[in-house]
Amino acid sequence: MDLLRSLKLNSITKKLGSIVISDDRIDCYVDNNKLRKYLEKKKNFLNLDSTQKKSEYGIDKPITYHISDYCFDGIVISTSDSIHFSSCTFNDEVTIAKANQIVLENNDYNNSTNRFRYNDRFFIGTNIKEFIMLNDSYENEGEDYKVDMKVKAESIRFSNSNVLNGVGALNLEANTVLLENSSIASESTLIQSKKVIIDDSSSIEGSRAVMIYSTEIENQDNVYSPKTIINGLQVESKKKTSHRVKKHD
């Protein structure tokens, strides 16, 4: 990489880590010490919007930030690019205001404050093009531990993942929601999506209710709840013992 190009890319990626350029994208492998200093300065606001500088420098490749083994104590994310979180710990609320792609892989989620009121969320994401949980477990610990998730994206995919909210609620809104070898088991689940795909090894469960609004649902028989509502109409209730996916090592 020539010096000028290196300086431009470091400016775009806020000097957060090492950069690898391939034919179709730019990968930034974030250094945790640099990230820590950045978040302390920005008060846990991770703003990685590179649109203006990429245009200024004539760089048209998408950027993916790789963040691993970092412990977050509350985080607000806004990026025009993509972030892949792996083996991280989220100890307080997670808010995603904007993102091209968010990938969550093998992370831990802990609500250390346990101060929820009605309609509070531990994890909330909006204005996301692609939201992916990959080989991940997003779950609660104990009856009083509330872990709610609300995500609005163009595409939502759970792959080999468990979303076990227990006493919490799950709210998903997208053009497509896809479950691949994955389990959703919440107190209540609401999905609003043009297309909902539940493969044969996946299930959606609600201890109180599951509501799905969609023009196309594949494998509706893998939805289990005392109260199941599809497009506003209640269907036959089904019960099933909790299905937990084994993650790959």
Image (spheres, rainbow, N blue to C red):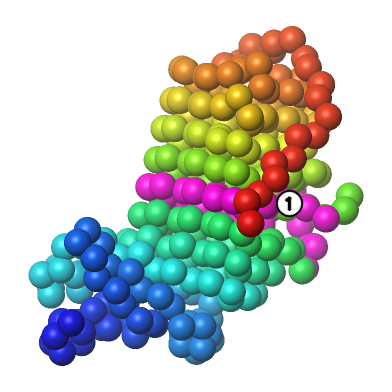
Residue at 56 percent across and 27 percent down: it is 199
Task: Give the amino acid at mark 1.
Answer: Glu
Is 31 situated above or below 237?
below
Looking at the image, residue 218 sits to the left or right of residue 209; the answer is left
Is 13 situated above or below 139?
below
Q: Position of residue 70 (x, y in %)?
A: 58, 76
Residue at 38 percent across and 47 percent down: it is 129
Q: Out of 246 and 102, give the one closest to the viewer.
A: 246
Residue at 69 percent across and 11 percent down: it is 235
Looking at the image, residue 119 sits to the left or right of residue 231; the answer is right
119 is within the stretch colored magenta: yes
Q: Out of 19 and 231, give the one closest to the viewer.
A: 19
Q: Secondary structure at mark 1?
A: strand
Is 50 situated above or below 17?
above
Is residue 121 visible in this depiction of the protein? no
Residue at 76 percent across and 57 percent down: it is 116
Chain part drawn in magenta? 113-141
Residue at far front of view:
249
State the residue position of label 1: 139
Looking at the image, residue 176 sits to the left or right of residue 246; the answer is left
Q: Out of 123 and 218, give the one closest to the viewer.
A: 218
Q: Out of 217 and 26, give the one closest to the viewer.
A: 26
Image quarter where the C terminus lies is bottom right
Q: Residues within 10 Å of mark 1 (few under 14, many from 20)?
A: many
114 is within the stretch colored magenta: yes
Q: Position of residue 76 (x, y in %)?
A: 52, 67
Image quarter where the N terminus lies is bottom left
Q: Position of residue 95 (x, y in %)?
A: 54, 60
Is 144 situated above or below 79?
above
